Amino acid sequence: KQEVTQIPAALSVPEGENLVLNCSFTDSAIYNLQWFRQDPGKGLTSLLLIQSSQREQTSGRLNASLDKSSGRSTLYIAASQPGDSATYLCAVEYNFNKFYFGSGTKLNVKP
Amino acid sequence: DVKVTQSSRYLVKRTGEKVFLECVQDMDHENMFWYRQDPGLGLRLIYFSYDVKMKEKGDIPEGYSVSREKKERFSLILESASTNQTSMYLCASSLPVTYEQYFGPGTRLTVT
């Protein structure tokens, strides 16, 4: 069974701070890794997709990196804002169309 | 913009009822998925489909079936709803090359 772990489970930071969310996985033979955000009671919104041949992806204030050999990905959020408050999930694709999700990091950015 | 829609945001059903959850995507994606999300357990894959009339079991298919008669529509069926199927159900579709997933808003199902 593939394991995807996200640490910390919850994080509270003041507005403006840069922060890093972590995702680790047990098997380095992955196809893709995708980061999502989820607002309470809502579906998931795709943030970034990193394919196995890539090391990082950037979108605006977000940067995601992938290190397959160590089984880790990080999501870096620059200059955090209250609107960034949400749960952030990573998902790892091991086999064709088989995605495994972490339990998420719940982020609270305080004004 | 990719749009994935689900037929209901909230649904309350009785034990033993047959329940249909509908999902529609408008981007001609081949791949579609059904997940359920529970506190402490995260998202778990129930079924996925990689083409019309094609389906594969995910990690927790017991008590569920699916139907994909048209490319844009993927239905999840609870043959006889039970209280342990109370959950948030999320539908997704994905691009054929990068497999980036796009999710619908979710259906919160309560079985009483």
Image (spheres, rainbow, N blue to C red):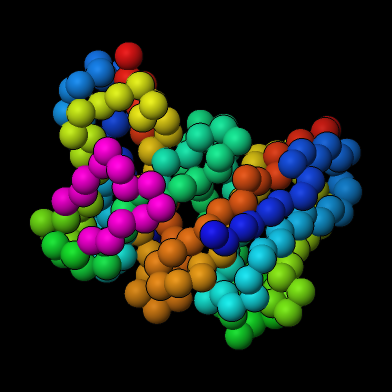
| Magenta stretch bounds | B55-67
Point 20% across, 21% down: residue = B16
Residue B109 position within the rendered picture, expressed as x and y whole percent measured from the top left: 35, 27
Q: Which residue: 81% across, 56% down? A: A20
Is residue B62 in the magenta section?
A: yes
Q: Is residue B112 left or right of residue A88?
A: left
The foreground one among A31 and A14 is: A31
Percent coordinates x, y for residue A72 in the rendering: 73, 68
Say whether residue B41 is left or right of residue A108. left
In front of the other: A67 or A59 = A67
Residue A47 in view in this figure: no
Residue occupying the point 53% across, 76% down: A31
**Hey, which quadrant is residue B36 in on the image?**
top left
Report if residue B23 is visible in the image.
Answer: yes
Point 88% across, 38% down: residue: A14
Which of the pair B13/A38 is nearer the observer? B13
Q: Is residue A83 magenta?
A: no
Above or below, comparing residue B78 to residue A31 in the picture: above
Instruction: Residue at the far left: name it.
Output: B69
In the rendered image, the vertical position of residue B56 relative to residue A83, given as above or below: below
The quarter of the rendered structure image containing the N terminus of chain A is bottom right
Picture quadrant where residue A64 is located: bottom right
- Residue B14 placement (x, y as % from top left): 25, 16
Q: In the visual, does A32 lie left or right of A105?
A: left
